[in-house]
Image: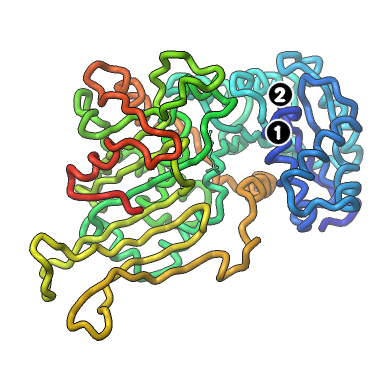
Amino acid sequence: MNEPDAPTPTIVIFGASGDLTRRKLMPALYNLYCKGRIPASTRIVGFARSDYSHDAFRQEMRAGVKEHSDRYGEDDWAAFSRNLYYSPGNPNSVEDFRRLDALVAELEGERAAGRLYYLATPPQLYPAVATMLGQANMHGESEHWRRVVIEKPFGADLSSACELNEKVHAVFKERQVYRIDHYLGKETVQNVSVFRFANAIFEPIWSRNYVDCVQISVLETVTVGRRAGYYDQAGVLRDMFQNHLLQLLTLIAMEPPAALNAQALRNEKVKVLSAVRPIAPGRLREHAVQAQYRSYRDEPGVAPRSRTPTYAAVKLHIDNWRWQGVPFYLRSGKALAERKTRIAVQFKRPPHTLFALKPGEKLAPNILAMEIQPDESIYLTFQAKVPDVGIAMQNVNFNFHYASAFGGDAIPDAYERLLLDALHGDASLFTRSDEIELAWGLIDPIAAGLSDPDAPPLEFYEEGSAGPTGAQQLLARDGFEWVM
Ligand code: BG6
């Protein structure tokens, strides 16, 4: 931890009375404090419309941390919460921002340092908050760094994302902007790069020469619950594919970056997104499946005849040397039987089979599966001889299991890592403006195409089921099936 009189950063959270602050940000900051990862005197200032005093804000946050951090302890909380403050205000009022600035300056006193502005407000307020930070002159870096973290969704489509980028860039330079995709903060997602680039044996086979297909699944058991106001407009493509699934795809498909820094890493990810083949209008039926869970229209706030997909499966191709001809299948849905995020790389079968197989039987392909959550692990399947029965084979696997290797509580919440990186000025795990725009450029035509008359029909699936049959057929047409 820092010396007591060392300059310490200030974190200002806009939207401090909201759910994200209570559930994720404050517990993550508290955990970082307990682990000694942030200076003990880091100041955290909440800003929102609610009329809290400093103490009332501390009480609210205490309830959130108690519920969502398993490190909660009265003494630690008392020490941590001494540095929590609150400034009520309207996100459209420059006077309120000046008052906030004055409070922060007073708290900083002689020990002014960098400031992290975290935008956890409803997305429609992002432009206003960025603009007000500029008008109140809170963005300049003449003395200390200023960074702005922007939560997802970053725009609702390509044009709104470009507009938001413009508004943000009118105040902040790109290097000051940290766009969150919390999937990038997950330990197991970061391990994709370690797995690929810190081991020499996988990279030579990581291409069209050996890989038959790649599958990325983000399956959820949760329903939309009380989020219909947002979700019924967004749907699964904008909510999950534009960000999380495309980010996973870039990490699996990118070339090894020349260095491990934000610029080099994001350049490679941008190259992947630029190489994804747009789905030609009129070919959507061959490439996509859309579905809705049966009770979705009964959720509070969902339009009674809503056609918003809560499940989608999409087949993409990447037009470059490494991946030409290899299909990437992406699927995600809510209200499913199990929660699982998994990347499966399926390798080609042996070109010639020595062993007797039954008529129509094929050797099972080798599959390398990265289980991102909930049971974090990596396994590789292969054929083994069953003992004592001539040549009979069975699919078995090598398995690496995070909890067994590193202990059960080794995996921190993604927000801890992301907050820490933003405080340290490392933007590697945040999305750059061109990445965001390319991702929207890919998703927009698919999302728009799904409401066309020649789009794949909207299927319905039972809550708690494995999802729509169309998703199985999408792969079956190419001779594949989803890795279960
Ligand atoms: C969010 C989506 O970005 O990610 C939610 O808006 C989704 O709809 C959530 O439930 C999934 O995140 P995780 O970390 O639970 O897989």
- Does residue 121 lie above or below 81 as drawn? above
| Lower sequence index among marks 2 and 1 | 1
Which residue is found at the position 30% from the left and 49% from the top? Answer: 482
Residue 414, image x and y in percent? 61, 48
Q: Residues within 10 Å of mark 2 (few under 14, many from 20)?
A: many
Residue type indicated by callout 1? Tyr
Q: Is residue 436 left or right of residue 362?
A: right
**Can residue 162 be seen in this snapshot?**
no
Where is residue 322? Give x, y as percent.
26, 53
Q: Residues within 10 Å of mark 1 (few under 14, many from 20)?
A: many
Query: What's the mark number on residue 133?
Result: 2
Kind of residue at badge 2: Leu
> Is 442 located above or below residue 110 in the figure?
above
**Disc 1, SS:** strand
The residue furthest left is: 359
Dot 2: element: helix
Q: Is residue 55 above or below residue 5?
A: above
Q: Is residue 442 left or right of residue 339?
A: left
Which quadrant of the figure has residue 147? top right
Question: In the figure, is residue 28 to the left or right of 311?
Answer: right
Tell me the residue that label 1 is attached to. 117
Residue 171 quadrant: top right
Residue drawn at 82 percent across, 33 percent down? 60
Q: Nearer the viewer, residue 368 or 484?
A: 484
The picture places residue 139, in percent across and down from the top left corner, at 70, 29
Residue 77 visible at all: yes
Q: Position of residue 146 (x, y in %)?
A: 70, 36
Q: CA distance from mark 2 to mark 1?
A: 9 Å
Q: Quadrant of the N terminus?
A: bottom right
| Tag 2 and tag 1, C-beta contact below 8 Å | yes
